[in-house]
Image (tube, rainbow, N blue to C red):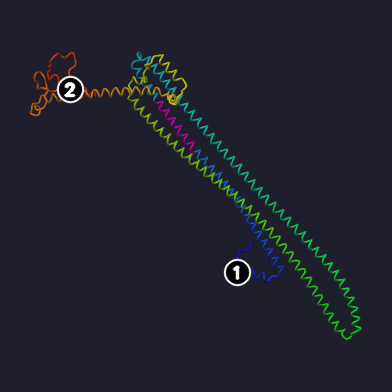
Amino acid sequence: MPKKKKKSGSGKKGKKGKLAKMTEEERIVYLEQQALAEEEMRKKKEDMLTQYLKDKLTKEEKFTRFNLNKINNQWRAIMRESKSKELRRDIEILSQTFERVVDRKDSVIQSLAKDIAEAEEQFAMALRSHLENVDALIDLQRQRLSTLQSEYDTELEILKKEFDTERDLIVAQHKKEMTDLQDVMFAMEQNFQDREAEARQEFQSMRDEIKNKNLEEKHALRIQLEGAVEDLWRQFQQALKSYNESTEERKVAFENLKAKDEKSAKEIEMQMRKLQRISDQIAQLKAKMAQNSRECDERNHQIKNEREVILQHFHALKDRMNSMRDRERARLTKLTLQSNSAIKELQRVHDKGERILKLSEMCRKLETEEEKVLPFYASSLTEEEQQDVEAAVGEPPSEPLAEVMHEYVSLENFWKRYNKVLLDKLALEKERAGLMTENNQLRTLLKQYLDGISVNDEILSQVNPLFVVNHRTNVKLSVPVVDPRVRRPGQTVVEAAHVVKHNTMGGLLKRDMV
């Protein structure tokens, strides 16, 4: 791994000092090594990012499976609890129905034990009505159970279908996205390998071409220089002869200068070749650096674009997953609220049914023997009217109110008993009101009589029933005598003690009855 970077100031100073101490070739080699190290670090970072994304995807899949298993377990517990409550409620209803049937049969047996000869026909009628009621209750219970079972099966199938479709959609989408990512990774790797091979091949061909070109130029220069040297050598020999002939004295000095000149020429030629080689290398390296910089810029730009595209795709997938999670959480919350409201509503209906059953048990204890044997009064309609009613009930309903009425046809016997009790209640209330009125009248008469037998200033100053003038009293009696057996034409004289005695006894009896 590359070493950690030091502080910027000290790092730049150390790098400048190190580069200043290096030669040109060492500096180029050092810069190339540094560029290769940076490229390797960038590849390692890309590999780490890819591995991080893969690990995150596997974790999300694991969490998804865990949450699905958790939801399934919770649903199983809720369904078991609701089914157990429903079974307990059915058992309680059946037990109460059984107790009601047993009580009714006991009452029938007791009434038959008292008077078997007279109640033979009534027993058969009661038994028949009892069996019809039991069959109706059983049919109603079976219909209710079949309806609940069908609703439960349909809802279960709908939930299964929705779950299967969502699971298939998520799995297919996951597979498709995985294949797309694998194709993208494979295409990126293949493109990178092709570009690297092309760059290596181009570099090798360019290097061989430059090397061959340098060798040819060197060979041509060598041939040209050899021809020039030969010409100069001939001219030099001729000049040397003439010079030797003309001047012999300067020959030694000339030889020395010639040796120095040859040595200087060799040094100059060697330096020129070295300078030419260095200038060629510099130009070649500049061209290579420019080409590498262009390729690196293009490659970096392309990689940045691909990275942006992958990041956008990743964010889009993450947003879709978050939206899906929020939608599923909202659906689960809604389902939980609806299930809680349904449980509360069913509990309310259950409590209401239990209260009705308790009231029915209390009312059953107050029923008479006749009501136990004949709970439903006979219809007052004729046979033709009864047939017309049955035909009207059998016709299909044409209005919403008629449809609702058809749903409650099975409660007709219940409404019969209810109406009978309501009529009895109204008759008793009316009779009680009449008795209360009569009792008040009798109390008034008693008060008038007591006021009449008392003699004092306060009584005499007021109206008095015993103060009679011209066969008339100044008190208006509240209850006139209307019975024709005791009514007489003209004036009526009744002994006060007789009236008080009979009115007092009648008032007491009526008050006891009330």
29 is higher (above) or lower (below) than 419: below
How many numbered discs? Answer: 2
Q: Quadrant of residue 165?
A: top right
Residue 365 highlighted magenta (yes or no): no
Say above or below: 386 vs 9. Answer: above
The part of the chain drawn in magenta is: 77-99
Which residue lies at the image location 36% right of the left edge and 22% below the top edge?
Answer: 417
Give the structural element (helix, strand or loop) at label 2.
Answer: loop
- Pinpoint residue 481: horizontal percent, then vertical percent: 17, 17
Q: Nearer the viewer, residue 168 or 191?
A: 191
Q: Position of residue 71 (x, y in %)?
A: 52, 41
The three-letter code of the residue at mark 1 reads Ser
Residue 25 in the image: x percent, y percent? 72, 68
Label 1 crowd (10 A; few <14 / some 14-19 / many >=20): few
> Which residue is label 1 attached to?
10
Question: Which quadrant of the figure contains the N terminus?
Answer: bottom right
Which residue is rendered at x = 58% and y = 42% of the image?
170
Type of residue at label 2?
Ser
Classified by dominant secondary structure, the portion drawn in magenta counts as helix
Magenta region includes residue 82 = yes
Sequence-wise, the earlier of marks 1 and 2 is: 1
Instruction: Give the x, y percent position of residue 129.
Output: 41, 19
Assign a secondary structure to mark 1: helix
Mark 2 closeness class: few <14, some 14–19, many ≥20 residues within 10 Å: few
Q: Which mark is in front, 1 or 2?
A: 2
Residue 478 got which mark? 2
Q: Quadrant of residue 508?
A: top left
Taking the image as shown, residue 452 lies to the left or right of residue 230, namely left
Assign the C terminus to one quadrant of the image.
Answer: top left
